[in-house]
Image (tube, rainbow, N blue to C red):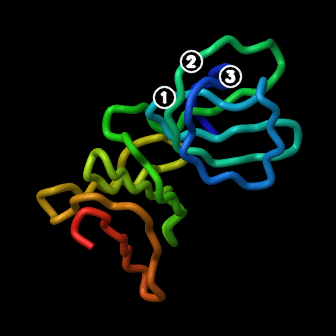
Amino acid sequence: MRGVQVPCAYEGAIMSLLIEAQLTEQSKPSVCGGVFRLAVGLSVTLIVGCAASGPSAPGEATATVFAQGGLLHGSNGVIFGPDGNLYIASVSSSTVLGVDPESGEVVERWGPEQGVSGPDDLIFGPDGSLFWTDIRVG
């Protein structure tokens, strides 16, 4: 996978989807407003988050950034689609993004123009249609 390797540390809150990650306080990731893959030992985790940068010790953990912030604020729902893209629901930005995990390119975007207000979580239906819950409109 391509991406930018960044050092990881922890200071602040991280909204994330954690899969089999056993993290210590010193090895938690820190990338503000981005989507990234974290590798700690043999565990791999996909995370969408925002945390203040802090010091990190060499060799603790690294994260591969898939998409830089800007469009991603208050992200919560994260799911891989049937097309292999990573879909992210961004409550604060009123946006649902589809990101190519290999290139980091935004390949789909739905925003207020399409009626998106506060997308919180995502799911794909059996026919491949994307659905999201919206905390601002119920």
What label does residue 53 carry, if any? 2
- Whether residue 91 sits left or right of residue 66 in the image: it is left
Query: Residue 9 got which mark?
Result: 3
Q: Is mark 1 in CB contact (under 8 Å) with mark 3? A: no
Q: Position of residue 118 (x, y in %)?
A: 28, 58
Q: x, y percentage for residue 66?
A: 52, 38
- For residue 128, side relative to residue 48 (left or right): left
Q: Residue at x 15, y 56 (%)?
A: 112
Figure disc tally: 3
Between the C-alphas of marks 2 and 1, the distance is: 8 Å
Of callouts 2 and 1, the N-terminal one: 1
Query: Where on the picture, by quarter, is residue 102?
Result: top right
Q: Is residue 78 above or below residue 129?
A: above
Query: Can you identify the residue that label 1 sits on?
Result: 32
Q: Secondary structure at mark 3?
A: loop
Tags 2 and 1 in contact by the CB under 8 Å rule? yes
Q: Quadrant of residue 57?
A: top right
- What is the three-letter code of the residue carrying label 2? Ser
Which residue type does callout 3 highlight? Ala
Q: Quadrant of the N terminus?
A: top right
**3D distance between C-alphas at marks 1 and 3:** 11 Å
Badge 2 density bin: few <14, some 14–19, many ≥20, Cα 10 Å: some
Q: Residue at x 56, y 18 (%)?
A: 53
- Local packing at callout 1 (Cα closer than 10 Å; few below 14, some 14-19, many 20+) is many
Report if the CB atoms under discs 3 and 2 are less than 8 Å apart.
yes
Three-letter code, disc 1? Cys
The residue at the far right in this view is 41
Task: Tell me the element at label 2.
Answer: loop
Residue located at (47% from left, 40% from top): 104
Q: Position of residue 56 (x, y in %)?
A: 72, 15
The furthest residue to the left:
113
